[in-house]
Amino acid sequence: MVLSALLRFIYPPPSNLFVTAMSVISLVSLGNSGIMEMKGRHMQYSKLWNFGTDQKISADKKAKISSKPGMIIAYTPAFLASVGSFVLLPVGDFRFALLRSAITVHFFKRIFEVMFVHKFSGWMDIETAITISLSYFINAATMIYSQYLIQGFPEPQTDLKYFGALLFLVGISGNFYHHYLLSKLRTKDDKNYKIPQVEDFRFNLFRWAITIHFFKRIFEVLFVHKYSAWMDTEAAIAIPVSYLICSTIMIYSHYLVQGFPEPQTDLKYFGALLFLVGISGNFYHHYLLSKLRIKGDKNYKIPQGGLFSLVICPHYLFEIVGFLGISCISQTLYPFCFTLGSAWCLMGRSYATRKWYQSKFEDFPTRVKALIPYIF
């Protein structure tokens, strides 16, 4: 009965001895590491270097390196393994691509933080650096390989990939934000530890949401979208100037309310959830659009999958949801005005897009609306 219930949520394990063994080894070894940490047998790096009276003598005798290069050694092999999987295993379904992307982004973030966010002051035992590096590499490679083995298997009855993507975005954003807060505790060359303090969380969340929004857009331009048309130079100038002015005013208008009493109804967490839903849905439907063409193909096709069966511009719908999330995080007037104006603009754009598809494709389904399912 337990196995039957479990198989509603996961694929049947592949009949592969290596994957089975690694599943058990990973669970036992990582669990044991946690128990050892609670007992005072710490992995020798960062603030826990040489911490604990029973480890001081042995730790001093071990070869050591600075924590920064040590953590680069720890994360880089796993990052290379996840990036390499896109070359070595180029085929796969959307779930497989999503898993590899999540693992890649996770370790890229870790390396980025080591290089540009964290301020290190401690040491790292070389044996610990190698152990962590091998652990991350083997576990990341095994996760990808085990997912590769089940390509073509029937999907689990309960599909959790979109919920998982949302959890991943919440987790990686929260992790990065709190690492950022830790980094602000020290000035350059300061090696003293301090108790972490709370800054203006709303303002930081607001700025990070805007930053992530435009980072995603640049990422999509570089690695996702497949372009076949031209762009008017005047529009290419007007659009970035507009985005620059609007994003600057949003941030400045929120800066001006620093120290004001909080609104009676706090919407920042609801806004963060809306933002994550919006940015995830927007990215997913951009990904679906990119899969309509192979390299060199310049022909348009009727989009399929996701909400494309209901509206022709679901990516616009999710973009509006994302902007609404940013507005709820800020709870100031200007972002709400910007969101409302953007919604009107995207409504017009989606209406024109639907008319274009109707003019190009005689078999365009009439049930597919422009922007809002069943309504518009």
Image (cartoon, grey):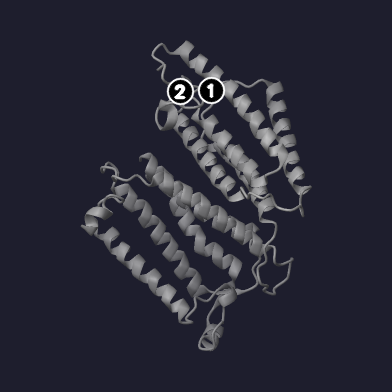
Question: Mark 2 = which residue?
Answer: 297
- Give the structural element (helix, strand or loop) at label 1: loop
Q: Examine the rendered structure and indicate whether residue 180 appears above or below residue 250.
A: below
Mark sitting on residue 122 = none
Q: Count neighbours of disc 1 (C-alpha within 10 A) and say few if under 14, some if 14 to 19, many if 20 or more.
A: few
Distance Cα–Cα, label 2 vs label 1: 8 Å
Asked if residue 166 can be seen in this view, the reply is yes
- Residue 55 lies, in percent from the top left, at 51, 85
Question: Mark 1 = which residue?
Answer: 228
- Residue 361 lies, in percent from the top left, at 43, 13
Tell which of 12 and 340 is nearer to you: 340
Q: Count neighbours of disc 2 (C-alpha within 10 A) and say few if under 14, some if 14 to 19, many if 20 or more.
A: few
Contact between marks 2 and 1 (CB within 8 A): the answer is yes
Horizontally, residue 263 falls left or right of residue 373, namely right
Q: Examine the rendered structure and indicate whether residue 22 appears above or below residue 324.
A: below
Please tell me which residue is depicted at 70% across the width and 52% down the height of the picture: 262
Asked if residue 291 can be seen in this view, the reply is no
